[in-house]
Image: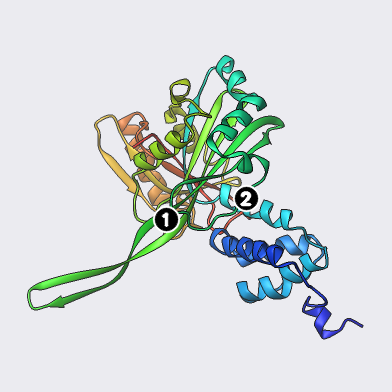
Amino acid sequence: MMSKQDELGLGDARLPQTTLEHVRLTVELLSKATSLGVVSEFLKNKGLHHSAGSWDEMRDKRIVPAVGKQRLRVADLVKLLSDAEEYGRSHIFLYQGKQTDTRRIFENSRIATISKRLGYSRALESAVLVDLPNEPTLTEIRQDTSNERPCWVFKIVETRQEKEFVEETAVNNRITREYKINRVRAVNVARLHESGFLEIRIQSHTNSTLYAADLNRIRTLLRDYLPPDVFKPVSLTKAKKALWDTRTAKDRKIRFSDSTMRNDYGTTISASTGTEQSDLFKDSGASDSIDHFLDKGRVLRCGEHLVVAPRRCCRSRDSYAAVGREQ
């Protein structure tokens, strides 16, 4: 019969201090990037004890003992963190380069030489875990696959300061609004495909829709790896319109969230769902209004963004992508 200690997953789990600190940091970052449910499902799929009511319980009663008993590798946790961070809330900017240029850029020896010169050899060997760095930090450079074709992935972690509204007070004829400044960990990813296709995913802001400064910062940091003059922006006008026009056929695969449209006359309208889990298309009044607006304006222009999300998304707490032009 399983003892109470084994049932809780405790047992004899003694880890070296460095490994324990590594696990604790990984779980801390997971708590910011995804949900308890995702981690619980991850453990369940590995045949491990997986229920937990808090992140502390998940760490101390589930993950640490499993690592101590060598039933769970730290590398598996880091991979889960990587997936959650790379496919979470983000604005995506797309570029295309010539294949002749990409072949040169793609060479392993070139990437290794640049990494050594810039001091990023460690990031090329394995992922570097950082929480709130003082400056944008290139934490991972790795070869991956996309549609069974090779690609290079560059991950940049930075610390942002974001405002959180606290309260509004009125005294005599004056109104004062108080905000709290939060330090937030942001993960940005660039992925270069063998075809020359480049995607840059910038973690979404909570209270801003402007990404020009973020994009410039990321492209500047990666300029030695990904020369800016090689890659030209990809227009998303046709893709966005095609997604919207074929939404009925894709309603089991794609969910439409916040959308901003601009017609030929420069007029802009916005439509937002009540929650991130809601579907704009399910509101016939909203979708009919957008159809009518686009019919009159003839085209969905390039300056807009359209937020789409997979129907079933298990990688992160609120995973979606907003595609748009540089702002």
Nearer the observer, 249 or 215: 215
Q: What is the x, y in percent for residue 128?
A: 61, 50
- Distance CA(mark 1)–CA(mark 2): 28 Å
Name the element at disc 2. Answer: helix
Q: What's under tag 2, amino acid-wise?
A: Ser
x and y percentages locating residue 259 in the rendered image: 39, 45
- Quarter of the figure that contains the C terminus: top left
Q: Measured along the vertical axis of the image, is residue 162 above or below residue 198?
A: below
Residue 236 in sight in this render: yes
Q: Which residue is mark 2?
A: 82
Q: Is residue 256 above or below residue 192?
A: below
Q: In the figure, 83 relative to 120: above or below?
A: below
Q: Position of residue 255 (x, y in %)?
A: 53, 48
Q: Nearer the viewer, residue 1 or 141?
A: 141
Q: Is residue 88 left or right of residue 79?
A: left
Color encoding of the figure? rainbow
Kind of residue indicated by mark 1: Thr
Q: Position of residue 26 (x, y in %)?
A: 63, 60
> What crowding class fits label 1: few (fewer than 14 Cα within 10 Å), some (14-19), or many (20 or more)?
some
Q: Which residue is mark 1?
A: 273
Q: Nearer the viewer, mark 1 or mark 2?
A: 2
- Whether residue 312 is visible to the viewer of this picture, yes or no, is no
Query: Earlier along the polypeptide chain: callout 1 or callout 2?
Result: 2
Please tell me how many numbered marks the rendered image carries.
2
